[in-house]
Image (cartoon, grey):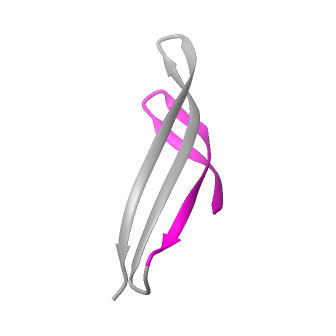
Amino acid sequence: VYALAGYGKMSLQSGTSDTFAGGGGLGFWWTQHFTSRLEVSYQAYRDLIGTENRQQGAIQGIVALGILL
């Protein structure tokens, strides 16, 4: 089980914006050479369209499989 948090700057046509991210996930070791991961994260930032300053957000889900040699 893990958690993630992040902060950065995003370059948009309307300028730069602070961006924040957070989420969590589960990692599984099935065998010595096979793994999997399930993760959900959310990212938030602001953009400027015309004269309207909007709060934007995106949710991302990831299912990953790994093979270790």
- Residue numbers of the magenta segment: 1-30
Q: Is residue 36 left or right of residue 69?
A: right
Q: Work out whether residue 66 or residue 59 is closer to the camera in this orientation and state it.
A: 66
Q: Which residue occupies the extreme front position in the image?
A: 30
Count of numbered marks: 0
Q: Residue at x 53, y 47 (%)?
A: 40
- Front-most of residues 32 and 66: 32
Q: Position of residue 61 (x, y in %)?
A: 45, 46
Relative to 66, 41 lies left or right: right
| Residue at x 42%, y 30% (from the top left corner) | 13
Q: Position of residue 8 (x, y in %)?
A: 60, 49
Q: Quadrant of the C terminus?
A: bottom left
The answer to which of 56 and 68 lies nearer the viewer is: 68
Q: Nearer the viewer, residue 7 or 58?
A: 58
34 versus 9 height, above or below: below
Occupied quadrant, residue 34? bottom left
Name the residue at the top extreme. 51
Rendered view: 35 above or below 37: below
Name the residue rendered at 57%, 45% in the picture.
9
Residue 36 located within the stretch drawn in magenta: no
**Residue in the picture at 55% in, 11% down:** 52
Drawn side of residue 22 relative to residue 36, left or right: right
Magenta span: predominant SS is strand
Residue 27 drawn in magenta: yes
Quarter of the figure that contains the N terminus: bottom right
In the rendering, at what x and y percent does residue 15 appear? 51, 32
